[in-house]
Image: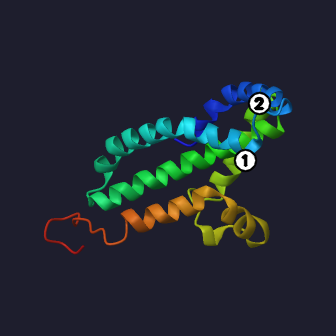
């Protein structure tokens, strides 16, 4: 879901061109532009999060409604963070292709250090574990998802009547 948010990059480059012209004329500042951009994408992000969460959550987990809400909020936070990263990349790298490569590279590094591929404690400590995994959104979201969905979960035994 978060990698798919890179698709909004080309339209944001076009918005940046308009912002440069209007910002130089003094119509509005950077803060108003960032807030307006977030508020304009907010309904779409909520819709994508709610639809995806509703379809996928109960297919995997049998938990309470509060766990479902946390799952959706966690997903919303991840998608909003990726949109923000791509906004920063678009403001620094105005070239379309280089911006996509840079944004995907940043998100790829965040995914590599999130704990999807190996445990956080197994990452090399000097660089990848401490600064990079703590800055990446995926490590926090994955740990929150584990605590929300897995703690207290019990599975049926492989053989009926066998040990759990």
Q: Secondary structure at mark 2?
A: helix
Residue 86 seen in render = no
Question: How far across and how far down the image is residue 38, in percent?
Answer: 60, 41
Question: How far across and how far down the image is residue 125, in percent?
Answer: 74, 72
Q: Nearer the viewer, residue 46 or 155?
A: 46
Q: Which residue is mark 1?
A: 106
Residue 23 position (above or below residue 152) = above
Residue 149 position (above or below residue 45) = below
Q: Which residue is mark 2?
A: 19
Residue 19 position (above or below residue 67) = above
Q: Name the image quarter holding the C terminus.
A: bottom left
Residue 76 position (above or below residue 155) = above
Instruction: Categorize mark 1 by other alpha carbons within 10 Å: few (<14), some (14-19), many (20+).
Output: some
Mark number, residue 71: none
The structure residue drawn at horizontal position 44% and vertical position 43%, both measured from the top left corner, is 49
Chosen colour scheme: rainbow
Q: In the figure, is residue 131 to the left or right of 7?
A: right
Residue 116 seen in render = yes
The image quarter containing residue 28 is: top right
The structure residue drawn at horizontal position 55% and vertical position 36%, both measured from the top left corner, is 41
Specify which label sits upstream in the sequence, 2 or 1. Answer: 2
Front position among marks 2 and 1 = 2
The image quarter containing residue 10 is: top right
């Amino acid at each position: 879901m978060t990698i798919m948010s890179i698709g909004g990059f080309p339209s944001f480059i076009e918005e940046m061109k308009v912002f440069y012209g209007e910002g130089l004329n003094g119509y509005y500042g950077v803060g108003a532009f960032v807030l307006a951009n977030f508020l304009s994408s907010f309904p779409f992000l909520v819709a994508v999060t709610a639809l995806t969460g509703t379809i996928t959550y109960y297919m995997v987990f049998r938990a309470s409604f509060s766990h479902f809400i946390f799952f959706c909020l966690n997903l919303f936070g991840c998608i909003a963070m990726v949109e923000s990263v791509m906004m920063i990349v678009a403001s620094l790298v105005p070239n379309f292709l280089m911006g996509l490569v840079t944004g995907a590279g940043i998100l790829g590094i965040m995914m590599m250090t999130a704990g999807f591929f190996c445990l956080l404690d197994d990452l090399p400590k000097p660089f990848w574990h401490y600064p990079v995994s703590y800055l990446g959104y995926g490590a926090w979201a994955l740990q929150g998802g584990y605590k929300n969905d897995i703690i207290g979960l019990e599975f049926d035994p492989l053989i009926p009547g066998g040990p759990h």
